[in-house]
Amino acid sequence: MSKKTSLLVLFFSIYCFIYFSITSLIFYISLSLGYDGLGIPFFGGGDDGEFYATQARNIANDQPAILTSIHALVLGYILKSFNSDSIFLMKGFNFLGNILLAYFSLKILKKNVTIPYVFNVSAIILLISLICYPSYLINSTLSIYRDTWICVYYIVSVFAFISLFIQKGKLGNVFTPILLILSMLLLGGYRTYALLSFLIASCIFLFFHRKGKNNSSGVRVILVSLIGFGIIYTFFRNYSIPIVDMSLQDALIYRNAGIELFAGGSQLYISLNQPNFILFLINYSYSVLSNALGPFPWQINGISMILVFISECIPFILICFFLYKKRKSFSATDTLLVIHAVVWFMLIGITNDNIGTAARLRMVGWILLILVAVKHLGISIINKRMK
């Protein structure tokens, strides 16, 4: 094992140790404070993990349960398999998700970076980025939220897609289609619109990137997307999409209901239910940018928003500028990852009007963009060393 490979193994071990330590620390602090070991109400409000824990225990005890996704079902069968009702066991399952996310992220990076010493540098930066990504760190260790597994299955689906359509491996004809179908089914089970995002982004990539030739220039993709979106908004906004069983109009009504129900706090108050496509597009663009990059300075209304602005908004904007500078050197895999991230941001920009919620929902998109950024950052570092 080379020195750089050993260093990568060390950083992977550090990543696992940090996530396990934080998960365990929160469990024992929560237990001592009387919160059943589930989480700590740092930011006030309820804990969705309480709902998942209750339903999982019902499933483990063969009692009726409310299933909003398959997350509680999976947790319930884990408890049943171990004949336990332990919160720590359920939190440990989420920790397994942390490991799988890092592993498959590294697998994607490995496919996208063919030079070993560049890969090692980029991989170490990736692991550091995942350790230092506040929203992912908090949401994957604080409780037993399903977001960790949504990220995992999305990343696994992207990895399988790359292996099947871009860089076919030795097992591409047998194992990869099975992995892709299984990960997509699980992704849809955890969150239906996550599966919809994956399918839309994958179709866009296949449409613009045919026969190994990159036809997906940014201007062309944006122009075709705007025309298509305009047609849908104008003529098909009441058409119910099978996967999510919801029309665009339903999504807009859902967003407005959220504004009225959770008025105050970190709401954006952006109405997308407009009489024409132009007005919709103006408000929608602002919503997408706010969900992907916010909070912007004028949207800050508390200490927590200041922390998100410093730790996420500023770094994300810098990453966007960096990726824009490197756009001409994008590989097919880079293009795929960027398309998936943009489609993800576009979808959450339709339904979500809350900056706090956006920090949690956008994790999938930013993990994908971080994968592209660390590749090119690794290349830049190696090139500077060689001069």
Image: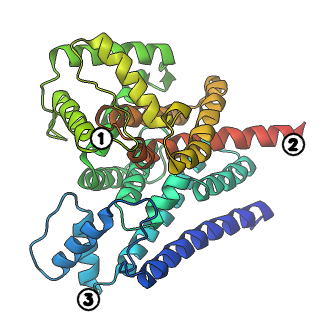
Q: Considering depth in this image, is 89 or 214 the residue closer to the camera?
A: 89
The disc, 2 or 1, on the residue closer to the chain's N-terminal end is: 1
**In x, y percent, where is residue 121?**
73, 51
Around disc 2, counting alpha carbons within 10 Å, would you say few (fewer than 14), some (14 to 19), or many (20 or more)? Answer: few
Quadrant, the N terminus:
bottom right
- The part of the image, by quadrant, that contains residue 379 is top right
Residue 380 seen from this side: yes
Q: Residue at x 44, y 50 (%)?
A: 155
Q: Which mark is residue 312?
A: none
Query: Please, what is the three-letter code of the amino acid marked with disc 1?
Result: Ala
Residue 165 lies, with reference to residue 28, above or below; the image says: above
Secondary structure, mark 3, is loop
Tell me if label 2 and label 1 are in contact, CB under 8 Å: no
Q: Residue at x 30, y 62 (%)?
A: 48
Query: Please, what is the three-letter code of the amino acid marked with disc 2?
Result: Arg
- Please give left or right for residue 277 compared with residue 379 in the image: left
Residue 282 lies, with reference to residue 116, above or below; the image says: above
Task: Look at discs 2 and 1 and give the one toward the viewer.
Answer: 1
**In x, y percent, where is residue 138?**
49, 60
Query: Please, what is the three-letter code of the amino acid marked with disc 3?
Result: Asn
Q: Residue at x 70, y 54 (%)?
A: 120
**In x, y percent, where is residue 274?**
24, 18
Residue 371 seen from this side: no
Q: Which mark is residue 263?
A: 1
Q: CA distance from mark 3 to mark 2?
A: 55 Å
**In x, y percent, where is residue 225?**
36, 18
Q: CA distance from mark 2 to mark 1?
A: 52 Å
Quadrant, the C terminus:
top right
Q: Which residue is mark 3?
A: 83
Around disc 1, counting alpha carbons within 10 Å, would you say few (fewer than 14), some (14 to 19), or many (20 or more)? Answer: few
Tell me if label 3 and label 2 are in contact, CB under 8 Å: no
